Amino acid sequence: MKKPVKWTVILTLCAFSWGAIHPITKELLNNGMNPILLSFLRYFITTIALIPSYLINRKKIHSPSMNEMLRLSISGIIGIAIFALLFDFGLRLTTPSSSSIIINSQPIFMTAFGIILLKENHGRLHFHGLILGSIGIILVVSRSSLSNIIGGASFITGNFLCIVASILISIFYVEMKGHVQKYGTIIPTFIATLSGTIALFCATLIGKSDFNYLTHMSMGIWFGIFHISFIATAFAATLYHKAIYVIGVGSASAFKFLTPLFGVFLSIFFLDDSLNFWIIFGITLVIVAIVLIHTTTSESDD
């Protein structure tokens, strides 16, 4: 399907906003932001932003059943709350470049999950993509030195948390697929996000987060939170789902390849994130693997 120029621009900006989540979140954490409180604020603002669309769509589409509501709520706790906590705690220990690559490696993790647990049959390119991606992730996670893994470097723990977060968000997307096909994007997303936000609020209470910190935050910190919550999580995601409807899944999802590239570039430019040849090589392998898996999946879906 031919892509209108405006959607090319819009989806490129969406990928840019998603990539910016990593360096912005890292900077917020570096400035003393509590990871639990930051996770809650991100999805609390997202939930508020989704309310108007939810109310409009609820009048047009019948509500999910109680069983479906329960499944969506559990999905929200796993794919929103636990994912956000693992991501923020992981990013506090690792670099934004690494988190950008790992979090956006979902197709690799889901292919491995399908082969090992679901006994799915995949083509040769899928298998090659899985091998390349696995090697690339090892290089990125270890930052090219296996002695770092043996020595237990702190960023290894952070990268591991990001890997688990990526697996959980991948499972979340798989679970959401059937609900989205039945009810559209907004209603299932709002229910899951609301559930995850409530769970995150409970986590802030259990973790005794200092809400007084909010009264002392600068405009720069508030802008960073506004970007990762409203612009990147709520607004860009809404535009992306609209693009899927207008130009098709394959054309729209191709722009997601830009997300880790923007994440790495912005991390280097604004935070002086350091890379060496082997890390860059690992990043390249991961991106090539994602392209291989995505391309063959799109062809089989057609």
Image (cartoon, grey):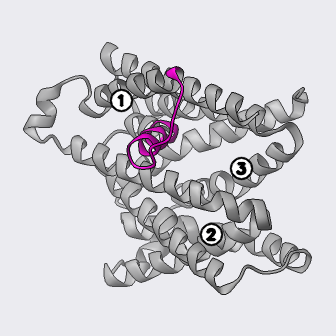
Q: Position of residue 219 (x, y in %)?
A: 57, 59
Amino acid type, residue under disc 3 in the picture: Ala
Name the residue beneath numbered marker 2: 45
Task: Assign a secondary structure to mark 2.
Answer: helix
Question: What residue is pinned by disc 3?
Answer: 236
In percent of width and height, residue 163 lies at 36, 46
Disc 1 target residue: 134
Q: At x 49% / y 24%, what residue is drawn?
A: 289
Q: Please provide the residue range marked out in magenta.
A: 106-124
Q: Report the predominant secondary structure element of the magenta stretch.
A: helix
Does residue 111 belong to the magenta stretch?
yes
Residue type for callout 1: Ser
Examine the rendering and report whether any part of residue 283 can be seen: no
Q: Nearer the viewer, residue 115 or 60?
A: 115
> Are the two marked residues, 2 and 3, in contact with CB atoms closer than 8 angstroms?
no
Residue under the point 77% across and 33% down: 302
Q: Position of residue 244 (x, y in %)?
A: 80, 44
**Residue displayed at 65% across by 37% down:** 15
Q: Is residue 181 left or right of residue 224?
A: right
Which of disc 3 and disc 1 is earlier in sequence?
A: 1
